Image (cartoon, rainbow, N blue to C red):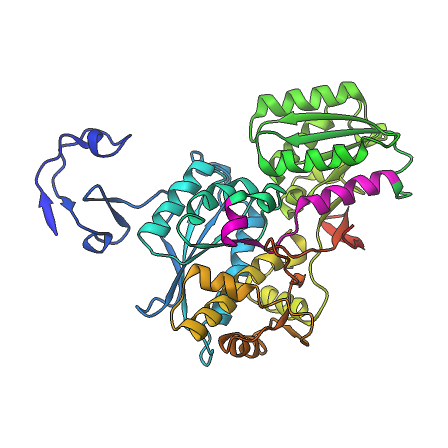
Amino acid sequence: MRTLGILTVCTVLLAGCSFTTAGGLSECDSSEDCGANQVCTNNFCLPQPAGCGQRYGDTSAEAVQLGAVLPLSLSATNPAAGKDESEVQGLNAILLALDELNEPGRSSRKITLHVCDTAFDATRTADQTQWLVADKKVVALLTAGSSQTLAAAAITLTKDVLTMSSSGTSPELTTREDNTKTGLLWRTAPSDAIQGRVIADLLVNDARFNTLQKVGLIYLDKDSYGVGLFEVITERLRTSSKTVRPIPYLRKDEASIVSAVSQMDAFDPDITVVVGFEDDASFIVKRGISSTNLKTSAGHKWFFSDSAKDTAMLDEDDVRNQLQGAYGTAPAQGAGQAFNSFQLRFIQKYGPDPRGFSFTSHSYDSMYLLGLGVAYSQGTSNTVTGPKMAEGLTKVSSASSAPIELTPTTVNQAMTELAAGRSVNVEGASGSLQFDLAGEASSPIELWQIEGSAFTEQDIIPPP
């Protein structure tokens, strides 16, 4: 490793780097020449991407290198904004599965997981993904959220890196052209083509909603998740007798949200469907409290999509009081032994019930599926690559085989079969993992209701 005494042309080497005369900047040929938390860029050791640096699991040289880009923080520029509790619990579910996959006696290689916090920023996600692929040599990547999954996939799909999303629900992921050629993009979360149709059908046909004629829809704009659900819901309602008013807003933009709520108040809906993340949804409800027509005392009702199912939305008394009796939907958690086992161990280790958040069981299953992919790739080719792991995932949905529930006591059975090149039929904590040719598993949808300080399950609706 070589060392430069003084650097005076930093801006030439890296956009945004400030002028410095500090000594000790190291030259490098690869990131192995650099110290901890540094990466070799243009032959100089520079800090690793913001939000990266956490490493979990087995750290031995023989371990398989996997990555995760997750929106753990609500803001990249404002630390006071805090963490996204639902995403934090999703990471806990991933780490629980990672610990179980790395237990002694497993019939597969150990795993290292490098975690980066995207803070809901697609550009930051892309930078982190590039670093994980180029410098950490990850063969597979876990993602969350539709926009961030698409940002990561723009890199991973060209680099033969398997990508698995636990909460990317946009229909756009299904039709992404390069994935139809490579088969490297998978998700345990069902497409919003399912959830959107369920929401619309509930509003039209369910006795709890079908008498409500004026439907408002406040949705997250310029985001594949928000726009995707908006399109599915409004198209489904287009031929109904409902009067529908969709109004977009921009993520974490107070002026945009205030304007959207004001417009919705003027529309005076019987029920407002909110498609957005918990922090935005909470602010929308708070603004509704001071409106004329969006208060529960005025007879107005609220309905939410999956991303708002987060106990943080019920922290403030005024919001919680306004939301008593409100409904929402989310991909259903599993109901079998795999979920019961996961739920018990999650509560024992982390405290909260995973049912209080969306996608915790889907996050758990996503890590387990990567573990099965590792077992197949290692067993059938004596090496672990993204394409070979993806090939292994095509063999976990055999309808002709007896189901194997993904628990710590049964996962070795699935690993052994896959390592021998045989197909299996696995059931996850999130339910059936019957993947189709697009790398998706259909899922029933939960209808939940807010009662006190909890989300209570009301119905489980089969996918239409």
Q: Is residue 99 left or right of residue 355?
A: left
Residue drawn at 23 percent across, 29 percent down? 18
The correct choice, above or below, for 395 with respect to 174 in the image is below
Quick one: 321 or 202, which is closer to the camera? 202
Quadrant in the picture for residue 10: top left
Tell me if residue 77 is in the magenta stretch. Answer: no
Q: Residue furthest front?
A: 181
Give the left or right position of residue 95, taking residue 202 as reference: left
Q: Main secondary structure of the magenta part?
A: helix
Residue toward you, 148 or 381 = 381
Point out the residue furthest to the left here.
5
In the picture, residue 232 is in which quadrant? Answer: top right
Q: Position of residue 430 (x, y in %)?
A: 66, 61
In magenta stretch: residue 184: yes
Q: Which residues are magenta?
A: 178-204
Q: How many marks?
A: 0
Q: Residue at x 59, y 21 (%)?
A: 255
Residue 290 in picture, x, y percent from top left? 72, 24
Depth order, front residue of 133/37: 133
Q: Relative to 79, is 253 on the left or the right?
A: right
Vertical order, 361 against 105 (above or below)? above
Residue 262: image x %, image y %? 70, 20
Residue 176 place in picture, x, y as percent: 55, 43
* Residue 169 visible at all: yes
- The structure residue drawn at horizontal position 56% and vertical position 45%, both measured from the top left corner, is 145
Q: Is 270 situated left or right of 309 in this image?
A: right
Towards the viewer: 362 or 346 = 362
Q: Is residue 51 visible?
A: no
